Image (tube, rainbow, N blue to C red):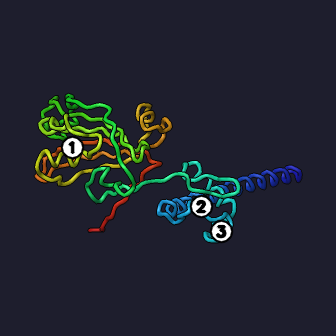
Amino acid sequence: MPPADRIRDHSGQGAATTVAAHRTRRRLRADQARQLADLLRHQILAGAFPDGTLPHESTVTDDYRATRNTVRQALDLLRAEGLVDRLPGVGTVVVARKYPHGLDRLMGLAETLREHGQVTNEVRTMGPSAAPTPVAERLRVPPGADVLYIERLRRLNGLPLSLDLTYIPLDIGGALLGADLENNDVFRLLESITGQPLGHAEITLEAVNADAHSAAVLQAPRGAAVLMLERLTHLADGRPVDLEFIRFRGDRITMSGLMHRSL
């Protein structure tokens, strides 16, 4: 290879190496920013900043041994979530709040969030409906049998929090047709109607994209991720009595529980 060609080849390799190194640094900074955002999010949700203002960027840089660019990128992630915002002359402040929803006790939403304000329910749809096969199977009713179907928009302190779709066997649910569902959890009403306490529930939690209807009702961006809680609740005698599909606004709720390891 002529000397000039060797020089050009070597120069090309050097440029490629520089680009690769730059991409690696960007990727590492993005990873570190995500890790820092997770730590700051936890502190925000735990109430570590009671005045609602995060420490100055330089303080965060020192406390977490991070670079200034990493700190700014982490704060950008939290701003994109709508959790914080930057106010001129003030700094980074908390602008949204998430409410804790425990997964280790079987409670209605009003019971769960009673310390955080008033839960109200807007009953959007309610009435007998033929049970789809998967619903009939899980509630142990004959295929096509009527069940009580309820759709409710649930608000906390006036803010849309969840959209609940509920199926209840009609021999029990019929008594709910005249009940005050706007101010009561279904759980409490079921216990009153049946004369026995609820026993246990099977739950599945996943993230799904909000469809057009859910997004409009929850006043969330279309396609935004929402937390979907599927819950099948049983009475104390084991009978399945309440099948729910609950879509929570993920920017307003956190799920937590206490788990024990058993082998």
Numbered label attached to residue 59: 3
SS at badge 3: helix
Q: Amino acid at mark 1?
A: Asp
Residue 97, image x, y percentages:
48, 53
| Residue 167 vertical position relative to residue 200 in the rendered view, above or below | above
> Can you tell which of label 2 and label 1 is closer to the viewer?
2
Residue 22, image x, y percentages:
71, 55
**Residue 67, quarter of picture:** bottom right
Observer-nearest residue: 84 or 183?
183
Residue 104, image x, y percentages:
29, 60
**Residue 56, quarter of picture:** bottom right
**Nearer the N terminus, badge 3 or badge 1?**
3
Q: Which residue is located at x 54 percent, y 64 percent?
A: 49
Q: Which residue is mark 1?
A: 242
Disc 2/disc 3 C-alpha distance (Å): 13 Å
Q: Which residue is located at x 31 percent, y 49 percent?
A: 204
Numbered label attached to residue 53: 2
Disc 3/disc 1 C-alpha distance (Å): 50 Å
